[in-house]
Image (spheres, rainbow, N blue to C red):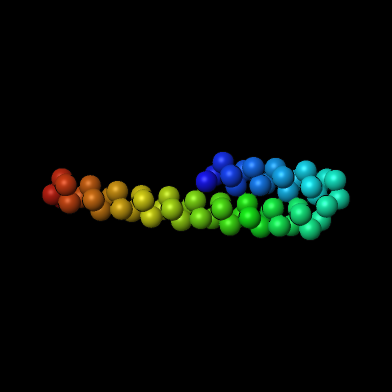
Amino acid sequence: MLKWALIFAVVAIIAAALGFGGIAGAAAGIAKFLFFLAVIGFVLFLALGIFAGRKITGR
């Protein structure tokens, strides 16, 4: 997912450099959404891993 966020960020930068403001804004918005979705997924799976590890080890 971070790969796609990076791709959209690059597309936004290139579109902005060429003067395509609408496309640049849309691509930047998609990149931002995908980045925060990846961060939320990371935090969620990190918490699940910590709590599942506690149940397995019995701590």
- In the current view of this chain or complex, which residue is farthest to the left? 58
On screen, residue 41 versus residue 53, left or right, reads: right
- Answer with the quarter of the image where residue 30 lies: bottom right
Where is residue 59 shown, x and y percent of the image?
A: 15, 50
Q: How many marks?
A: 0
Please name the residue shown 74% across and 57% down the image. Answer: 25
On screen, residue 57 versus residue 8, left or right, reads: left
- In the current view of this chain or complex, which residue is farthest to the right? 19
Please name the residue shown 60% across and 47% down the image. Answer: 5
Please name the residue shown 36% across and 49% down the image. Answer: 46
Please name the residue shown 58% across and 44% down the image. Answer: 4
Where is residue 27 shown, x and y percent of the image?
A: 69, 53
Where is residue 37 shown, x and y percent of the image?
A: 51, 55
- In the current view of this chain or complex, which residue is farthest to the front? 23
Where is residue 48 shown, x and y percent of the image?
A: 30, 53
On screen, residue 26 versus residue 49, left or right, reads: right
In this rendering, the answer to whether 9 lies above or below 26 is above
